[in-house]
Structure formats: C-alpha cells, structure tokens
C-alpha cells in the first residue's frame, strides 16, 4: 500500500449526497443506474453512473444518502456524462458493490473530514 500525504487526502472532495432520481442505464456495458444526486446548496445536483444493480433497486435508492467524490472531471460513459463518483466497497468475488453511506442522516453537501 502506498502512503500519501495529508495534503493529498485534503484534495479529495468527499461529500454526502442524497439520491433524488434513479434511472436504469440500458446502454451501459455492465448493468448500471443513472443517478441524480443532491449535494446541497454549495455544489448542487450531479449525475453519476453506478454499477450497483446487484444489491439495490431504484426504489430503495431514491432518498438514500451516499458518499461521493465531487471534484473529479466529468467522464463520458456511453451517451451519458458522469459528474461524480459514488463510493462503495467491492464485496466478494462476484463484484457486488456495497455503498459507502453515513450511518445517520446528514445535511446534503457535508464534507468528509
């Protein structure tokens, strides 16, 4: 494992967001959802493609809070532009992603410290 400096970590904007819309992403190479996430007043809403269909349905994702990286440059994924990275943990050999989430409800936009 490579060590990083504290200043490196400080550059990553990890924020709490609330998923406000979920759509199936049929054009994706691997099953995925298109998410619209509210990151609060300062950042606003951002869109993300997330390969989390194994463990989550659209219904259970709407209103769910997640932790996202909001300062990556936009990334073209097929016909969709992903504006942030939803964080999670690869669980086992099957590639199922378990979302990284706050354990209590937070105000959208709060920065991970």
Image: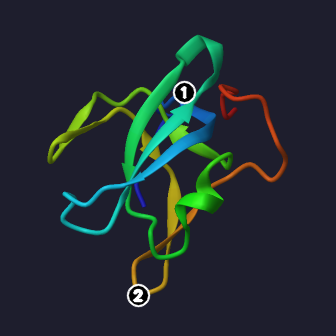
Residue 75, horizontal then vertical, whole percent: 23, 37
Name the residue located 60 percent from the left edge and 33 percent from the top edge: 15
Residue 93 horizontal side relative to residue 28, left or right:
right
Q: Residue at x 58, y 29 (%)?
A: 38
Asked which secondary structure carries label 2, the reply is loop
Question: Can you tell which of label 2 and label 1 is closer to the viewer?
Answer: 2
Residue that label 1 marks: 10
The answer to which quarter of the image holds residue 84 is top left
Where's the N terminus, which quadrant? bottom left
Query: Which residue is painted at 60% across and 44% down in the image?
Result: 67
Label placed on residue 93: 2
**Horizontal side of residue 33 vs 26, given as left or right:** right
**In the rendered view, would you say 79 is above or below 71?**
below
Count of numbered tags: 2
Residue 63 percent across, percent down from the top left: 68, 45
88 w.r.t. 38: above or below: below
* Mark pair 2, 1: CA separation: 31 Å
Mark 1 surroundings within 10 Å by alpha-carbon count, few (fewer than 14), some (14 through 19), many (20 or more): few
Q: Outermost residue, right direction? A: 104
Neighbor class of circle 2 (other Cα within 10 Å; few <14, some 14-19, many 20+) is few
12 or 4, which lies in front?
A: 12
- At 41% from the left and 26% from the top, the residue drawn is 71
Q: Is residue 11 visible?
A: no
């Amino acid at each position: 494992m490579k060590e990083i400096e504290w200043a490196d970590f400080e550059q990553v904007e990890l924020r709490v967001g609330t998923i406000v819309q979920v759509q199936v992403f049929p054009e994706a190479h691997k099953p995925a959802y298109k998410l619209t996430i509210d990151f609060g007043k300062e950042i606003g809403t951002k869109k993300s493609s997330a390969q989390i269909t194994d463990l989550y349905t659209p219904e259970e994702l709407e209103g769910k809070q997640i932790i996202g990286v909001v300062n990556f440059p936009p990334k073209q994924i097929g016909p969709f532009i992903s504006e942030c990275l939803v964080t999670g943990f690869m669980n086992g050999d099957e590639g199922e992603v378990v979302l990284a989430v706050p354990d209590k409800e937070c105000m959208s936009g709060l920065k991970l410290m």
